[in-house]
Image (cartoon, rainbow, N blue to C red):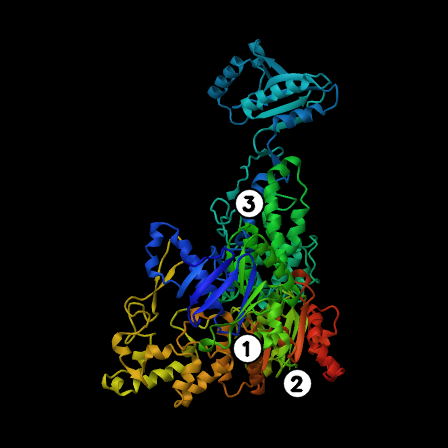
Amino acid sequence: MRTLSLDYLEIRGARVHNLKNIDLKLPHNQMTVITGVSGSGKSSLAFDTIYAEGQRRYVESMSAYARQFLERIAKPDVEEISGIAPAIAIRQKNTSRNPRSTVATATEIYDFLRLLFARAGRVYCGRCGGRVKKDSVDEVAAQVLSLEPGSRWYVLFPIRGTGDQVSTETLKSHLFELRAKGFNRLFQQGRTFEFSTPESLLEIDFRQPLFALADRLAVGPASDLRQRVVDTVESCFRESGEAVFESAEDPTRQIRFSEKFECKDCRVVYEEPEPRLFSFNSPFGACPRCQGFGNIMDFDMERVIPDPTLTLDQGAVEPWTKPAYQKFLLKLKRDARGQGLRFDVPYRELKQKEKDLVLEGVRRFFARLEQKKYKMHVRVFLSRYRGYGQCPECRGARLRPEALQVRVGGKNIAEVVALSLEQAQPFFDGLQLTPEETAIADKVLQEIRQRTLFLNDVGLEYLTLDRLASTLSGGEAQRIQLATSLGSHLVGACYVLDEPSIGLHSRDTARLIKILAELRGLGNTILVVEHDRDVMRAADHIVDLGPGAGERGGEVVFRGPYSKLVANGGGSLTGRYLSGQIKIPVPAARRRLDPKQQLRFYGAFAHNLKSIDVALPLHALVAITGVSGSGKSTLVHDVVYQGLRVVGNRAAEEYFAPQGLEGEDLAGSQARLWCRKIEGAERIEEVILVDQSPIGRTPRSNPVTYSKAFDLIRDVFAHTPEARKRSYTPGHFSFNISGGRCETCQGDGTVTVEMQFLADVELVCEDCKGKRYKSSVLEIQFQGRNIHEVLQLTIDEALAFFAAYPRITAKLKLLADIGLGYLRLGQSATTLSGGEAQRVKLAAQLARARCDRTLYIFDEPTTGLHFDDIAKLLGAFRRLINNGGSVLVIEHNLDVTKTADWVIDLGPEGGERGGRIVVQGTPEQVAECAESYTGRYLQEVLVDQRQACPDRAEAYPRVQ
């Protein structure tokens, strides 16, 4: 019998996908990086073997209901895995689409915030702003004993049934109860009335407040006074919930105490805070108008005021620029006279009070138009400005008003979650609480502080706590999961991470490594699929798979420490790049940039952009760089891509926001201008965003259908003799339409089983066994293979199989040229990584003969790419540019940045401290900028180049 070590996770005979029956020993409680070229089997080993087996064993330990599905869930194709710990996968995909999910809820910070505000929050009156609280007996005694020595006081409590609502029977019954309890005196307006003298009671005005006299006392040093006050107040609270101290010398001086949770000035009783009051997912706490979403279908102020850099006089309120409605601006001037509203200051710089005056005027304007909706042109006009706008009741806070009246550290919960993580950390660290509040909130604050610290440490300090989870990039979502895992203090687990450095600037990679080290230090095993040099350098153990991709991969090329990999670089493609034996070269000469061939964007102000002017050279590779949160995606997606969509292929000089664009052009589409002006858009006829979104959302989408090669392949099968004999058309070989596909799974090859306790499970179709087609269709063969077997070929294998069909091979060769030769023709789009999906789209663009007047936009195209794959990607970019196109990329990878023709570096930091252009120019010019983080790292990779050609930077003039 073989002895198993508890120090290692041992894998024997792994054959999942392209893995070649590999054996591995991975050390526990250490960080192992799994690397290799794209398609070499990294994810097959990390996720489809190790994580899948860990998850399967976890489910096996669950209820009988769960276990009934286990026989149908395929085990990983591996002989044996021993020493496996409970596995947790942290992937790069952001699967959250819940409009209620935020950074705070995803990290559990919001759960602790709700508890903090419910237990240590201070409630303030919504009318007068006074503190709302209960008065304890001890607090009353302390306050009374601090009054002026020698002062005399009546201690009273109000009698129910007096005042405006007088009920004779109720009052009579209550007075008898009080007398029976020993309260023999009544008190009203400074006078005392004795029950023992009934005639005096006739002088009481029962329509006015009436009190029972509980005691009379003089403030002094008597040792028993405190206990006397305590007893008297307890008696008053017991009878009415209130105690009133009235000065015997000055009847107008009263001090009221109440055990009710109420405002002492307004006498308004409030509900005591509880955690559900602060939940926008609960009907109890959610804003009744927007149901906790924070926005409603109403007039969209971003459409009403599309350019907040304009003043009111310049036409910031777009509908009031129309001749028929200009009078409403004059009306606002009249109505706001003397209220401090400035009409000559950009709208975005107005104070909130001034903006409220404008918004109120706008609402009155639309309310007036609503009365004329019977007119068609009015309905059309109103529709231009409708959209999802901020809820007017909660102003986007999502909560009912009572929740927003509770404050901690001077802020309500909506104001706290509006803080960035960078701002939140000092806020929680510096909270000043009373000793009682500290005792209650100490452990809760400890959890909050720890989580905010972790999130800052992974480079997410620019995110606000109320940021919607659905708007996060894959890398941001992954780092949030990582920080949450660290905050949970889970030990003895096996974390499997998919390229956690995605979206991270080189500056922030060290912070990520620190977090991984802390997670390992807790007693966890860390497996990281990664290509980043710094992450590999920090690993305890490296496994390099290869030597190639697809069928040429799946073998362990190297295992051991980083130093050994670099020293033995010749045996591994990864090692050869790390050791410098192979390099991605800096271009010998950069393209000459034509100052007349540019796109110019003036006053870009979206999100955190600080009204910047940006010039993008055309017919070149332009890289947008900067630390995480500096505004790269905002500039490229919202300003450039969306702005060019609005303008179209017309001369942009004619269009100014909002005066130049007519209402139907600006408000009639979902796009809007996020800059003041665009020049040069007439030089661009088409803008293509090649992002990492899936090429399809069903298992029927795959690389061969996306590239249009499947149409040609189906035609080949339809022309075989047997297919002609059966009158089969190309449609019979499609799994998207009825005819030849398996109708049980609708051509997917899988069926979905809903699991109440876990995510839905995808199972192989029992009728077609995952082959997608009817058995009769699978009988048709071409060169010894049926349609299913052809779809199982890799792209490289298909090139040889269809060598006699140049139209098919021409489309497939483009996929192979950019490093996707390992993909199978029929591989489901849902299994492709973001980087693979992006390259499939790139191949479709490379198929075009010419790319004249086309701008291609890529968002971190190096995601998931090995050094060797990046070299192929750069070659594809050169082809696009040589064919007449222009390429704009958002990128952190220095191999791409150093080969760019022009670099625009944003920053200097993320969030509010970003949004500016730190430097722009050639990589050599950026490297010379001391203020640029990108420049500092570029300088290291360009040092050899600068020595070879010291005045290269001077050879390329800046774009003016």
- For the point 36% across and 49% down, which residue is it? 63
Q: Are marks 3 and 2 in contact (CB under 8 Å)?
A: no
Query: Residue 869 bears which disc, if any?
Result: 1
Q: Secondary structure at mark 2?
A: loop
Q: Secondary structure at mark 1?
A: helix
Q: Which residue is mark 3?
A: 114
What percent of the width, then of the height, locates residue 878? 58, 84
In this view, the residue farthest toward the left is 725
The relative height of residue 163 versus residue 814 in the rendered view (above or below) is: above
**Does the rendering let one see residue 537?**
yes
Q: Secondary structure at mark 3?
A: helix
The relative height of residue 541 versus residue 882 in the rendered view (above or below) is: above
Q: Are marks 3 and 1 in contact (CB under 8 Å)?
A: no
Which quadrant of the view contains residue 831?
bottom left
- For the point 35% across and 70% down, which residue is it? 748
Counting residues from the start of the chain, the first of labels 3 and 2 encountered is 3
- 151 lies left or right of 649: right
The relative height of residue 956 versus residue 15 in the rendered view (above or below) is: below
